[in-house]
């Protein structure tokens, strides 16, 4: 990463988001997709990294289709581009049609009732309204189930008055390259589309793109990999790292043999040593599950988190480091090359997605490569 000016005085936790890396990841995903175009999923504030700067940068890379979860996120996305396709994965909720119309949002219709509501809205508007339709193929979360899909096949007029832009479906297990449900979902989606009115289709999230061509259909729909998360479990991560997080050492103390550290006295230092306290806690998204499990990087060394994570503070065992290291005021790396979001997630028994979306608002944030 290029170096940036020092953060303002008073900064004790520093989050750096590398938009150049997001752009590189977008290009890599496009390369994987070959001739198939690539949308971007920017729900949950672009996985916690900032919808506005992320979307601006992706627009600059030529991305023209964006998926959000909620209509509110989609309105923000629309404010950044009058021409991009902005689609709402959570579908069309009750009373939301006027908002979708006003902002030119495309609902991803999730059941026959939503299809009917959107058709009613098209009738009132006196024009065809763009729509995407989600067909469930094994996720059992959103999307038309098998019974509803059969009805839509039997009664395709239910789509009359809509400008059908895309069929979508969503993988349940794409991060496990060999999971049998992947092939099942690819095949189910292919079969139902043979009987449904023709329109482009989209199946692959980040991991799905790495399953290969049979998963690609007509549009890639990645989120996580854009933000540097590993697409496939157990394989090398080909994505560029986007996030780094560092925190200041507030205090270094020498402790006597048998001393305990932190709430609940959950860690004992049998031989004593040195404990450093850093300015970052679960309120900053450093999950409480990382107590006695996480690790941070001090200079070139990795040292363990000891004791529970507090709201604003974390304690690390620096006994093994050279005397005077770290010094109070030094920075330690909490997320970086050697503590990737996927690795932090593993220590916390969760997934990188939750690490990113938990990052919180208290860090000083800076963006490398902002297209603003
Ligand atoms: C979140 C989401 C995506 C993006 O998934 P990633 O695993 O982050 O790439 C794609 N499609 C749907 C329906 C989603 O909910």
Image: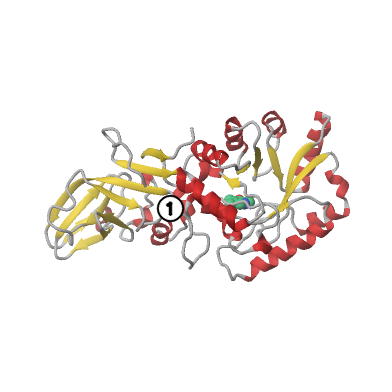
Residue at 57%, 56% in the rendered image: 206
Q: In this view, does 199 lie to the left or right of 54?
A: right
Instruction: Estimate the x, y position of residue 327 in percent, counting from the top left.
Output: 17, 48
- Specify whether residue 67 is in view: yes
- Specify whether residue 93 is in view: no
**Could you say which is closer to the camera, residue 174 or residue 294?**
174
Residue at 24%, 54% in the rendered image: 299
Q: Quadrant of residue 273?
A: bottom left
**Could you say which is closer to the camera, residue 63 or residue 257?**
63
Q: Is the residue at mark 1 in contact range of ligand 1, meaning its CB lies under 8 Å from it? A: no
Q: Is 231 situated above or below 311? A: below
Q: How many marks?
A: 1
Residue identifier under label 1 = 241
Q: Which colour scheme is used?
A: secondary structure
Q: In this view, does 354 lie to the left or right of 347?
A: right
Instruction: Estimate the x, y position of residue 22 in percent, counting from the top left.
Output: 49, 47
Q: What is the crowding at mark 1: few (fewer than 14 residues within 10 Å), some, or many (at least 20)?
A: many
Instruction: Estimate the x, y position of residue 323 in percent, counting from the top left.
Output: 12, 56
**Could you say which is closer to the camera, residue 128 or residue 210?**
210
Q: In this view, does 358 lie to the left or right of 295?
A: right
Q: Is 335 situated above or below 79? A: below
Instruction: Estimate the x, y position of residue 202 in percent, counting from the top left.
Output: 69, 53
Disc 1 element: loop
Q: In which quarter of the image is residue 135?
A: bottom right
Q: In this view, does 101 lie to the left or right of 229?
A: right
């Amino acid at each position: 990463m290029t170096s940036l000016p020092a953060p303002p005085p008073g900064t004790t936790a520093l989050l750096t988001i590398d938009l150049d890396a997001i752009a590189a990841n977008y290009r890599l995903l496009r390369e994987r997709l070959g001739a198939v175009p690539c949308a971007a999923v920017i729900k949950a504030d672009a996985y916690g990294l900032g919808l506005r700067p992320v979307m601006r940068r992706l627009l600059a890379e030529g991305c023209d289709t964006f998926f959000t979860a909620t209509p509110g996120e989609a309105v923000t996305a629309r404010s950044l581009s009058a021409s991009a396709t902005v689609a709402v994965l959570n579908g069309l909720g009750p009373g939301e049609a006027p908002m979708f119309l006003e902002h030119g949002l495309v609902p991803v219709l999730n059941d026959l009732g939503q299809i009917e509501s959107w058709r009613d809205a098209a009738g009132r508007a006196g024009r065809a309204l763009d729509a995407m339709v989600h067909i469930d193929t094994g996720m059992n979360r959103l999307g038309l189930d098998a019974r509803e899909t059969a009805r839509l096949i039997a009664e395709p007029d239910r789509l009359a008055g809509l400008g059908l832009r895309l069929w979508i479906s969503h993988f349940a297990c794409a991060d496990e390259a060999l999971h049998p449900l992947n092939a099942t979902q690819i095949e189910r989606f292919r079969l139902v589309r043979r009987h449904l009115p023709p329109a482009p289709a989209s199946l692959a999230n980040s991991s799905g793109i790495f399953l290969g061509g049979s998963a690609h259909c007509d549009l890639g729909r990645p989120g996580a990999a854009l933000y540097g998360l590993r697409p496939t479990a157990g394989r090398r991560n080909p994505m560029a790292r986007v996030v780094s997080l560092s925190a200041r050492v507030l205090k270094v103390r020498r402790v006597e043999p048998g001393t305990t550290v932190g709430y609940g006295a959950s860690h004992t230092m049998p031989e004593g040593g040195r404990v450093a306290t850093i300015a970052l806690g679960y309120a900053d998204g450093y999950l409480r599950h990382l107590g006695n499990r996480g690790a941070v990087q001090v200079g070139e060394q990795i040292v363990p988190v000891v004791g529970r994570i507090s709201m604003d503070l974390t304690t690390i065992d620096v006994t093994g480091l050279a005397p005077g290291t770290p010094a109070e005021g030094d920075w330690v790396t909490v997320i970086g090359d050697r503590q990737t979001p996927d690795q932090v997630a593993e220590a916390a028994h969760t997934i990188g997605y939750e690490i990113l979306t938990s990052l919180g608002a208290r860090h000083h944030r800076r963006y490398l490569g902002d297209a603003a």
